[in-house]
Image: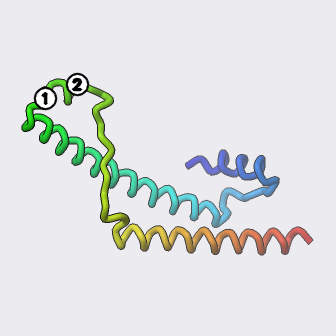
Amino acid sequence: MDRAKLRMQVFEKTGIKVDVDDPVFALVALNEAVLEETVVRHLERIDAASADLAQHARSAGGVAPAAVAASPLARPIATSRDGLSPRELRLLAAAAGVAILSSALTATLFLAFAR
C-alpha cells in the first residue's frame, strides 16, 4: 500500500488533505487484509472445483486429460450454496463498523476544522 499515492488520490477526489499517519490508513490496511484472505480462500475453492471438474470430465470420457490441463480458459467458476462462513461475516461486520466509525470521525473532524 502506497500511502502517499492514496493520500494524493483522496486529495484529488475530495480536496481533503489526509496525513500519511492518519488512522484512516488503518482502515485501508484492514480492508486489504480481509480482501486478501478472502481472495486466497476463494482461489483455493476455485482450484479445488476445477480439479474436481477435470476429474469428472476424465472419468466420463468427455474431455481428454491433456485438453483440460492445456486449456488456459478451462477454469470453471466455483459456486457455493453455503454463503459466507460465520468468520467471514464477523470480519465483514468488523470492517463495516470500522468504516462507519472512521467516516463519522472524519466528518466530525472535517466539520470541526472547517469552521
- Left or right, 58 with reference to 2: left
Residue type of the residue flagged with mark 2: Ala
Crowd tier of the residue under label 1, counting other residues whose Cα lies within 10 Å: few below 14, some 14–19, many 20 or above: some
- Left or right, 30 with reference to 111: left
Up the image or down, 32 lies above or below 107; here it is above
Residue 76 sits in quarter = top left
Up the image or down, 32 lies above or below 86; here it is above
Residue at 78% over, 72% down: 109
**Residue nearest the viewer, comparing 28 with 52:** 52
Residue 107 sits in quarter = bottom right
**Residue nearest the viewer, comparing 102 with 90:** 90
Residue denoted by label 2: 70
Q: Residue 7: x, y in percent?
A: 70, 51
* Distance between the alpha carbons at the discs numbered 2 and 1: 9 Å
Q: How many marks?
A: 2
Q: Residue 110: x, y in percent?
A: 81, 68
- Left or right, 80 with reference to 113: left
**Residue nearest the viewer, comparing 100 with 109:** 100
Q: Residue 51: x, y in percent?
A: 19, 42
Up the image or down, 34 lies above or below 6; here it is below
Residue denoted by label 1: 65
The local secondary structure at tag 2 comes to helix
